[in-house]
Image (cartoon, rainbow, N blue to C red):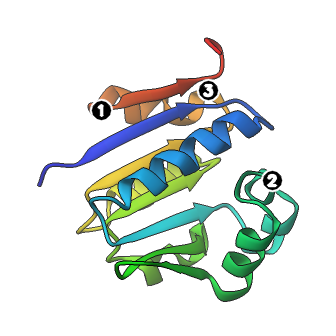
Amino acid sequence: MNRERFLVKSFGDNIDGTKAGLIKLIQLLDTHDHAVIVVPEIGKVKSTMLVDALGEDLSKALIKNREIAFPGNKKISLCAQSTLKNYRHADAYLALWGSEYTIADIEALPNWASLVLVTWLPKDSAQWEAANRVTVIYDDKKG
């Protein structure tokens, strides 16, 4: 299976990196039907950059319903790393502030075609980059 891997080298509380990851995920809905945003913890998502990046209304709907539907039978779901196993059959994933464990969990899923990783710490993506062909779409150090 041909899989696309995209990396947003974002460090810490970087709204631009978060937005870059979300924009890429939304672009992927052109060719994919179901995308999942994976966050470290659902309970804390209301006070994260995801709300600023998506806007108040969209983020409220996503957090409340765990899903947003778009025209053409497209959807974006939201889950925590701990509930990723319930979202095994999506086409694309966005790992927001993902650790090496989040990446490994998504890589182990059977059917995905695209993965976007937004890092929190530089070391989080080092092994993944070394083991896979990864396209860097944003680099905090380069602006």
In-image side of 62 versus 30 (left or right): right
Residue in the image at 54% along x and 27% along y: 138
Q: Which mark is residue 131?
A: 1
Which of marks 3 and 2 precedes in the sequence?
Answer: 2
In-image side of 37 versus 121 (left or right): left
Q: Residues within 10 Å of mark 3 (few under 14, many from 20)?
A: few
Which of marks 1 and 2 precedes in the sequence?
Answer: 2
Q: Is residue 101 above or below residue 69?
A: above
Counting from the top left corner in percent of width and height, residue 142 is at 61, 11
Disc 2 residue type? Asp
Residue in the image at 27% along x and 44% along y: 4
Residues 113 and 31: in front is 31
Disc 3 residue type? Pro
**Mark 3 → mark 1, Cα distance in angstroms:** 16 Å
Q: Residues within 10 Å of mark 2 (few under 14, many from 20)?
A: some
Q: Is residue 2 above or below residue 12?
A: below
Q: Is residue 135 above or below residue 98?
A: above
Quadrant of res 108: bottom left
Q: Are marks 3 and 1 in contact (CB under 8 Å)?
A: no
Which residue extends farthest top? Answer: 142
Q: Secondary structure at mark 2?
A: helix
| Residue picked out by circle 2 | 52
Counting from the top left corner in percent of width and height, residue 58 is at 70, 71
Residue in the image at 47% along x and 56% along y: 26
Residues 24 and 101: in front is 24
Q: Residues within 10 Å of mark 1 (few under 14, many from 20)?
A: few
Q: Which mark is residue 122?
A: 3
Labels 2, 1: front one: 2
Residue in the image at 67% along x and 32% along y: 121
Q: Quadrant of the C terminus?
A: top right
**Mark 2 → mark 3, Cα distance in angstroms:** 23 Å
Q: Which mark is residue 48?
A: none
